[in-house]
């Protein structure tokens, strides 16, 4: 009779031991799962995040600038098509520029026409193509919706005054500068009005390095360079004037020209 009682007591003792062990394991696991980070661990995580950010931010910034350049080239492609269609309908003449001509206005003292951008607008149907995305880099007071110039220096020199470029006179269409993006401002006296929809290169150079700095509009909008539109319709990014691939003349390879 005594043995069964001892077994029963032993059984209860064993169960109690197992219960204590289970409680110990549960408590240990709970503490392990809910343990707070130490200060050192937090600092390590923060350092890793900072390193990753330092590695990613330049790449993201470069991607943004590349996207701006690609969109600008797309704008120039559409502008080139609009100018070509305009010339087809106007005896091979591209749109003529005048003085400062805001959108919706007429150059009463010069060409007697709307801006060159507004002249080709019916062939494009979208004013957004006249806005270069890189323009946002300029101080706010210099930002505007019209950021491309009309390359008509050859016509100006040939005619001795304002005149449209004649497509049939262009001997080197793949090199003839028909336009491009321009910030339209510089620290000197030359300054395009941000709201001028008729920016041109009659009397101010718009391609970096093609003339003296005092005659050159600020142009380094895209990664210290700019996009140029040529008479054959293609556009390309350049660091500055390239004498082997650009010309401002009808029948000679030449840089930007002045009457004086």
Image: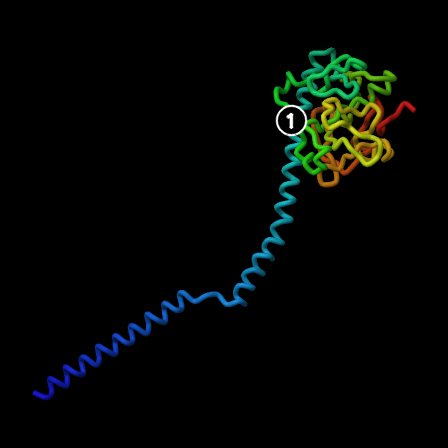
Residue that protrudes farthest toward the front in the picture? 141
Residue in front for this viewpoint, 253 or 108: 108
Residue in front for this viewpoint, 186 or 235: 186
Residue 229 position within the rendered picture, expressed as x and y whole percent measured from the top left: 72, 28
Residue that protrudes farthest toward the bottom in the picture? 2
Residue that protrudes farthest toward the left in the picture? 1
In this picture, is 24 found above or below 50? Answer: below
Write the residue at 74% across / 24% down: 196
Q: In which quarter of the image is residue 218?
A: top right
In this picture, is 213 found above or below 250? Answer: below
Q: In which quarter of the image is residue 33?
A: bottom left
In this picture, is 215 found above or below 84? Answer: below
Residue 4 position within the rendered picture, expressed as x and y whole percent measured from the top left: 11, 84
Q: The N terminus lies in which quarter of the figure?
A: bottom left
Q: The C terminus lies in which quarter of the figure?
A: top right
In this picture, is 243 found above or below 105? Answer: below
* Side of 153 where 31 appears, left or right: left
Q: Answer yes or no: is residue 76 visible.
A: no
Q: Answer yes or no: is residue 162 visible.
A: yes
> What number of labels is visible?
1
Name the element at disc 1: helix
* Side of 39 where 237 appears, left or right: right
Please say which color scheme the image uses.
Answer: rainbow
Q: Quadrant of residue 234?
A: top right
* Side of 252 where 96 appears, left or right: left
Name the residue tied to disc 1. 129
Residue in front for this viewpoint, 108 or 251: 108
Write the residue at 74% across / 17% down: 95
| Pointer 1 local density, CA inside 10 Å: few below 14, some 14–19, many at least 20 | many
Write the residue at 65% across / 36% down: 68
Residue 155 position within the rendered picture, expressed as x and y whole percent measured from the top left: 82, 19
Write the residue at 12% across / 84% down: 5
């Amino acid at each position: 009779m005594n043995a069964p009682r001892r077994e029963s007591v032993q059984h209860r003792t064993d169960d109690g031991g197992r219960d204590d062990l289970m409680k110990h394991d549960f408590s240990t696991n709970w503490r392990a799962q809910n343990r707070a980070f130490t200060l050192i661990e937090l600092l390590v995580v923060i350092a890793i995040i900072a390193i990753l950010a330092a590695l990613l931010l330049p790449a993201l910034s470069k991607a943004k600038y590349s996207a701006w350049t690609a969109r600008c080239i797309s704008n120039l492609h559409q502008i080139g098509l609009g100018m070509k269609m305009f010339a087809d309908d106007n005896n091979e003449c591209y749109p003529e520029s005048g003085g400062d001509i805001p959108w919706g206005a007429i150059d009463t003292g010069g060409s007697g026409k709307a801006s060159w951008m507004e002249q080709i607008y019916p062939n494009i149907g979208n004013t957004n193509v006249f806005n270069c995305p890189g323009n946002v880099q300029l101080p706010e007071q210099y930002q505007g919706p019209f950021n491309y110039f009309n390359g008509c220096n050859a016509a100006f020199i040939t005619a001795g005054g304002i005149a449209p470029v004649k497509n049939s006179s262009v001997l080197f269409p793949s090199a003839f500068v028909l336009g491009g993006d321009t910030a339209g401002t510089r620290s000197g006296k030359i300054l395009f009005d941000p709201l001028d929809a008729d920016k041109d290169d009659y009397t101010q150079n718009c391609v970096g390095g093609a003339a003296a700095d005092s005659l050159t509009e600020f142009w380094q909008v895209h990664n210290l360079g700019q996009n140029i539109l040529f008479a054959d319709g293609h556009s390309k990014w350049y660091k500055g004037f390239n004498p082997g691939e650009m010309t401002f003349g009808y029948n000679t390879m030449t840089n930007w020209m002045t009457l004086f």
